[in-house]
Image (cartoon, rainbow, N blue to C red):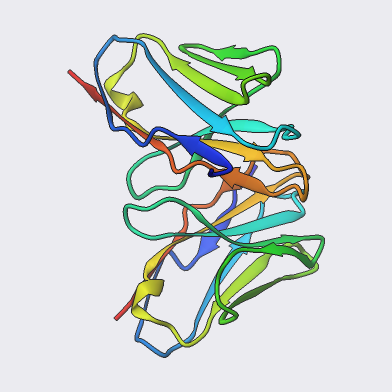
Amino acid sequence: RKEVEQDPGPFNVPEGATVAFNCTYSNSASQSFFWYRQDCRKEPKLLMSVYSSGNEDGRFTAQLNRASQYISLLIRDSKLSDSATYLCVVNSNSNYQLIWGAGTKLIIKP
Amino acid sequence: EAGVTQSPTHLIKTRGQQATLRCSPISGHTSVYWYQQALGLGLQFLLWYDEGEERNRGNFPPRFSGRQFPNYSSELNVNALELEDSALYLCASAEDNGSPLHFGNGTRLTVT
C-alpha cells in the first residue's frame, strides 16, 4: 500500500458543481497535512493546510479524519479556473519527510 | 517578500554532460527540498537539506548530488546526464519541519 493515495481522476465536473477529493494515508502518527494545486507544467502552489478541526477558505473546505486516516478537499461552486491537479501532502513524522500523493486531475467544463 | 528563486529557467545539455541548478529559499527558511517531475508524472523527491546538511535523499543514483550553502541557498548537480533526466526540477523551501513547502518556478532541463 502506498503511503499516500489519491484517486488519479480525471474528475470531469460542470461549472458550478461541488466536487470532493479524498486522500488516504498509511502512517497513523502523521501530524501535518496540506493540499496543493498544480497547473500544467507549473510548480505546485499551497492551497491550504488541513487542521484537525477542519478549515475553510472561501469555496474550499479541508477536513481531516484521523480515525479513518484520510483528508478531504471540498470545492463548492466550481470555476473554470479550478481546473488543475490537486495534490495532498502528508508529513511522515518519522523523519519529517513530506510524502506526496500522485494527484487528482480536475477538469471543470463550461 | 521574495519567493523561492531558481536558475536557470531552462537548461539544455547533451548526454554525458553535467548540469548545475541553483535555488535561493525564502528569507528565513533553512530547509531546501529538490524534486524531479518528468512530463506528465508526479513529484519525485530528490534531496532535502536543512541547516547546511543533507537530511534525506530519494531513490536516485549518486550522480544526483547537491549541497546547501551557509546562506541556505542550494545547488543540485547532475553528472553524466542521461536522456531520461529531462524533467522539471523543482526547489522548495520551508520555515521548519512540518511547515508547508513553497516552490520556485523550476528549472526545465532538457537532455539531448
Q: Give the position of the C terminus of chain A as an image quadrant.
A: top left
User: In screen coordinates, is A18 left or right of A90?
Assistant: left
Left/right placement of residue A53 relative to residue A88 reads: right
Residue at 62% in and 25% down: A69
> Is B33 placed above or below A49 here?
below
- In the rendered image, the residue lying farthest to the left is A110
Q: Is residue B88 above or below residue A19?
A: below
| Residue that lies at the very extreme toward the front in this rendered image | A1
Residue lying at the far bottom of the rendered structure:
B16
Give the camera-side residue of A29 and B94. Answer: A29
Q: Position of residue A34 (x, y in %)?
A: 60, 32
Q: Residue B86 location in percent, x, y?
A: 37, 70
- Which residue occupies the foreground of this view, B62 or A78? B62
Figure quadrant of residue B45:
bottom right
Say which of A93 and B67 sits in front.
A93
**Left or right side of B5 for A20:** left
The picture quadrant where one finds residue B84 is bottom left
Determine whether A50 is above or below B6 in the image.
Answer: above
**Quarter of the image with the N terminus of chain A in it:** top right
Residue A71 in the image: state x and y as whole percent: 57, 24
